Image (cartoon, grey):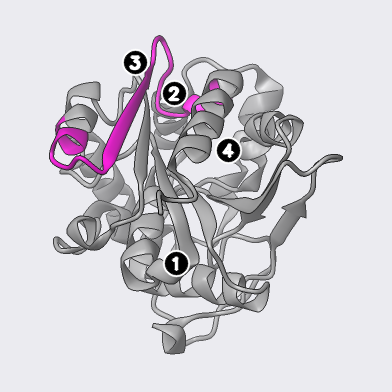
Amino acid sequence: MADSAVPLPFVDVRTPTLVTDAVPAVLIHGWASGSAYWEPLVEKLLDGGRTVWIVDLPGYHPRQELPLDFEWTLDTAAASVAAALDARGGGPVHLVGHSMGGSVSLTLAAARPELVATVTLVGMVPAPQNEGFKNLLVSQLEQGFFDAGTKAKLMGAWYGTLPDEDMELLSKGFDAPFPVLSASALAAMTGVEPSVPGRVHAPLLVIAGTGDRVRPIEQMAAFVEASPNRQLKAIPGAGHSVHWEQPQECAEALHKFWRTSWPPPA
């Protein structure tokens, strides 16, 4: 796994004024997204005494140039995050992955369990994607660029109606080079290798908005019910980007989960 890693040029380490727990939270963004959309949640986690590490996945940090032979897959993205953790002393850490970042988190937890205290999936579970969303992405990959109309549809599905300032900020994920967007989109659509969820033994929480237009709450619940190691926190009225829409509720769910799940019982 390590041989497929690339250095991550952006790992933003945030330390609270008073650290109440030494295990950091590592936030992993989704497709066509970036570190900016974590800011409301980061503020709440810092208020609760949690150190936070925010990563940009391969190719998503401005002006990062990937090696010509780098193949963007969930495995290589997870390997790159693992290398960044190793470079900072290893784990265990609390992984928090939104959407595609959840797939990266699961892949990492399955391959390098010693690095992972817990896993939280935000707005995703490893299950078949919405066909309309998938077909929309495929049409853009075939034409070789993401047009303005499609970007607007995707942003609407992810965030609902946004003020112009927030729209400009949150749509910067589409500024990543098209080869990075296309390869990571394919990785996101393909999803994790089928054996991955069963190889994740760390405590797992799914945070889901009941109004998510990308992943229905029924899909989230079915995944959680398949294992006693999994929990579901449904947040009423929130959509796909629950960490942006309702950061306080999201932070409270995370703090409670971490407090009750780590360290594991002797």
3 or 1: tag closer to the N-terminus = 1
Does residue 85 sit above or below 239 in this rendering?
below
- From the image, which quarter does the N terminus lie in? bottom left
Q: Secondary structure at mark 4?
A: helix
The picture places residue 69, in percent across and down from the top left corner, at: 44, 88
Chain part drawn in magenta: 222-245
Where is mark 4, residue-wise? 171
4 or 1: tag closer to the N-terminus = 4
Q: Is 187 positioned to the left or the right of 101 in the image?
A: left
4 or 2: tag closer to the N-terminus = 2
The picture places residue 155, in percent across and down from the top left corner, at: 47, 30
Q: Identify residue type, mark 4.
A: Ser
Where is mark 3, residue-wise? 211
Where is mark 1, residue-wise? 179
2 or 3: tag closer to the N-terminus = 2
Q: Identify residue type, mark 3.
A: Gly
